[in-house]
Amino acid sequence: MATKPSNHNLNGMVTFQNPFPEKPLALFSQSPPTGFYRDGYCRVGPEDKGNHAVAGVLTKEFLDFSASRGNNLRSIGLEPGCKWCLCTARWKEAMEAAKGKDDPVVPKVFLHATDESALNNGITMESLKNFAAEPEAAGGGGSLERKAPITPGVKGGMAKETH
């Protein structure tokens, strides 16, 4: 299924969207600073080969799972409870390994802060909603929702973790 690019509006300005029509991507976490660009947003760009689009809260089980696949997120200081922009492929792997909807190996997703590019990388809206944090499953809004679109900047550095 082809979808429109996630980073251009009708005026040609670069913007980033969550998976819900007409909703701008929300800030996810600045402590720790997350996102490929370490600006707090789960936005992706051409440099982000891992597509760090899924806004999730880390669990012990996911950290163990990721480490077993060669990406030890604890080595960069992350721990259970941290909000982190996850690689779509790793989140999908965890979802496929899960023994059910409540398996803690799959981080709960914050839809309003997840970049819509996740939908172009093998994750369905149904899957995101199945693992959405409450009350996220109802509509992708939330108290962190931004009212104005963001544009890319130079703040922060690029992610250094491995995949």
Image (tube, rainbow, N blue to C red):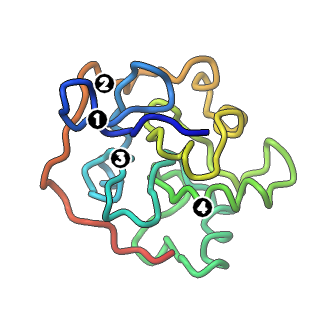
Label 3 vs 2, first from the N-terminus: 3
Q: What residue sits right under mark 3 in the picture? A: 43
Badge 4 vs badge 3, beta-carbon distance below 8 Å: no
Q: For the residue labelled by badge 3, is the local secondary structure a helix, a strand or a loop?
A: loop
* Left or right side of 163 for 10: left
Label 2 vs 4, first from the N-terminus: 4
Mark 1 or mark 2, whichever is nearer to me = 1
Residue occupying the far left of the picture? 154
Q: What residue sits right under mark 1 in the picture? A: 8
Mark 3 or mark 2, whichever is nearer to me = 3
Q: For the residue labelled by badge 2, is the local secondary structure a helix, a strand or a loop?
A: loop
Q: Amino acid at mark 4?
A: Ala
Residue lying at 46% horizontally and 49% vertically, measured from the top left: 53
Mark 2 or mark 4, whichever is nearer to me = 4
Residue lying at 36% horizontally and 33% vertically, measured from the top left: 25
How busy is the neighbourhood of tag 4: few (under 14 within 10 Å), some, or many (20 plus)?
A: some
Determine which of the numbered discs, if any, sits on residue 146 in the image: 2
Badge 4 vs badge 1, beta-carbon distance below 8 Å: no
Q: Amino acid at mark 3?
A: Arg
Determine which of the numbered discs, if any, sits on residue 160 in the image: none
Q: Is residue 10 above or below residue 82?
A: above
